[in-house]
Amino acid sequence: MMDYLLYHSPALIIAIPLLGAFLTPLIGRINDKLRNIFVIIILGLTCYFVFLLANDVFTNGIRTYVFGGGALTVGSGSSAYAIRILFEIDGMNAFMAIIGCLLPFIAVIYSWSFMKENTGLDKYYTLVLLMTTGMLGMILTGDMFNFFVFLEITSISSAALVAFWTNKKEAVSAGFKYIIISAIGALFVLLAIAIFYGQYDALNMAVLANNIQYTFLDKIALVLLLAALAMKSGIVPMHMWLPDAYGQAPSSVTLALIATTQASLYGALRVCFTIYGKQLSNVLNQIGGIDFTLSSILAILLVALALITILVGVLMALKQSDLKRMIGYAAVAEIGYMILAFGAALATMDTTGALSSAGDMALKGGIFHIINDALDIGLLFLVAGAVYYATKETSLNRLGGLARNMKYTTVFFLIGLLAVSGMPPMNGFASKILIYETTYQINPILSIIAILSSILLLAVFVKVFHSVFLGPSFKEYSNVKEAPKTMLIAMAIIAGIIIVFGLFPDLILNNIIAPAANALVKPEVYINRIVGGVL
Amino acid sequence: MIFNIPYLAVVALILIGLYAVLFRRNLIKIVIGVTLIESGVNLFLITLGYRKDSVAPIYTSNPNVNQAMALPVPQALTLTSIVIGVAVLALMLSFIVHIYRHYNTLDVRKLGGDEE
């Protein structure tokens, strides 16, 4: 029985939330409470299957699941076409899937009280479940066109959720910005897929990675894919939508939006490390005896973008007067840290395609920071949501003295602020110290900028902490109540994970992060599973 | 050369679309730009699957078995892409309706200016 469930878990992870999404309005007609419980159960079930699958992948290695029959190909011999839809789950997919199911699960628990006073909640929950489906599909799929379809499902549902409060004009324009960016990004991805299909007659990622020649057209495809996915992950200079979307969406939605941003980042990593994995160590150009490989050129690009992203994120966060926009810019800066780590890892790649030990640690630090960023920034957004719920206010100038009435929320904000600025013993410290250490070995200036920006982030959030929670109490907030229980539970879950990750980073690094990093640096494992394995 | 004309059309459509998205001030024109890019990409996909003198890939309606057939996969991809495109278009237009209700204008320059 367990084997059967495990075997079909990749399909179930997509099918359960998708089915749940369209059942939600029906159940919502019966009873609101029943619907909320139903959605939590659906996402809890999804989480269960993701953990079941992830546990198996981390111990037994890569898994594949072919839809519509056992064999991947149609036809036989030389006329065999690998056209079936295929899910391929290695360490990296499993790691991202954990983020992709955990955050929406916490978001729906939080929504119970947070969204209670809104109308149209049936649609809200349907969209949240659709967004989860799209996100998990993007993460698990092994097929380029499938990736595009799930990318669009995620974009449409999350744009509708960003503008869920249509009575606020900023929310609608943020949603419009988001859908335009997403639509163009997705079309770029489709164009790149068409270029691949025209050349290699395949849509499967592993087959593409095996056949790729790095022709002129492939260069265009790489640029298109990286530009589109970087746009969707909010890397400067294409970050303009991110603070708006994060800031205007309901806080529970923002938590799930963070996971979709990370899913796009995962797409970029999959393209860089797996599809172009065999070409990374190709020497493209020689200038004065120095070999310029594809990996070194990508590394220069990523590190440069990362530094700009970190600086712009932190400096813009300093001057914001709106709590949620400020956290949005901090989220931009945090994405910069991940890109910095991946750039540093690529910089150490030699001509055989192996990373140095520092590069390996940088890669692990970057991957660890993906989940840490999701948790830290997510917690801060949930706290901002709780503050908004209690006071109906997000402007820093009109908030103050809330610590007197909102004890637990204050503690959660403190945990979030320490974690996001990389203070021990929180999880942010565990991953940022890896990034500092390894970038120092590549170039000390990189780590100096990274550390200084972290200190600035701390300064930003200490200022926020002071102006929102401390200071003289405002008369209009004298009878503000603590956030409702389900919101506190949601925040407590994240805070608990943050502290556990911070106290036992080795446990996480060895059991979850190491398989993910291994999956990225060894594209041949991913390829050989399909080419010569199933095919 | 004559076979490259569809590809030139693809490039032209995508560039015109990008121009509209980047430089036009009217929201509707921005949306038209997005749909132009989409048409360009769809045309590209369809062109990839076409071979000279080929027919539609339906076995039963083709008496001449030896005649070349167009590749059906890009057509399936294009159909999917068109359906998704309609959904995105509808969502974008409904956003525009809401934006017009709030701001009473469709000019991009007048939207972002009143931030606190």
Image (cartoon, rainbow, N blue to C red):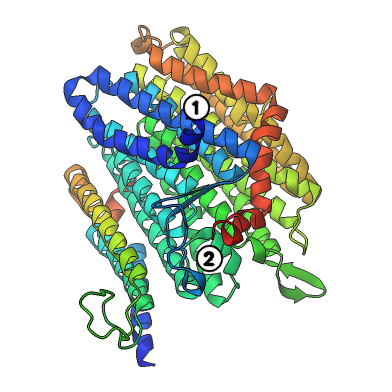
Q: Are marks 2 and 1 in contact (CB under 8 Å)?
A: no
Query: Which residue in the protein does label 1 denote?
Result: A380
Decide which of A268, B75 is in the foreground and name it: B75
Task: State the image quarter where residue A74 is shown.
Answer: bottom left
Is B63 left or right of B45, judged from the image as shown?
Answer: left
Mark on residue A223?
Answer: 2
Task: State the image quarter where residue A428 is shown.
Answer: top right
Q: CA distance from mark 2 to mark 1?
A: 34 Å
Which residue is pictured at 47% across the width and 37% down the height? A100
Tell me the crowding category of disc 2: few under 14, some 14 to 19, or many 20 or more residues within 10 angstroms, Cα based.
some
Q: Amino acid at mark 1?
A: Leu
* Quadrant placement of the C terminus of chain A: bottom right
Q: Label 2 lies in what chain?
A: A
Q: Secondary structure at mark 1?
A: helix
Decide which of A118, B82 is in the foreground and name it: B82
Q: Label 1 lies in what chain?
A: A
**Horizontal and vertical percent for residue A153?**
34, 48
Which residue is pictured at 45% across the width and 40% down the height? A8
Name above or below for residue A108 compared with residue B65: above
**Horizontal and vertical percent for residue A285?**
71, 75
Which residue is pictured at 57% across the width and 25% down the height? A417
The tag earlier along the polypeptide, 2 or 1, is: 2
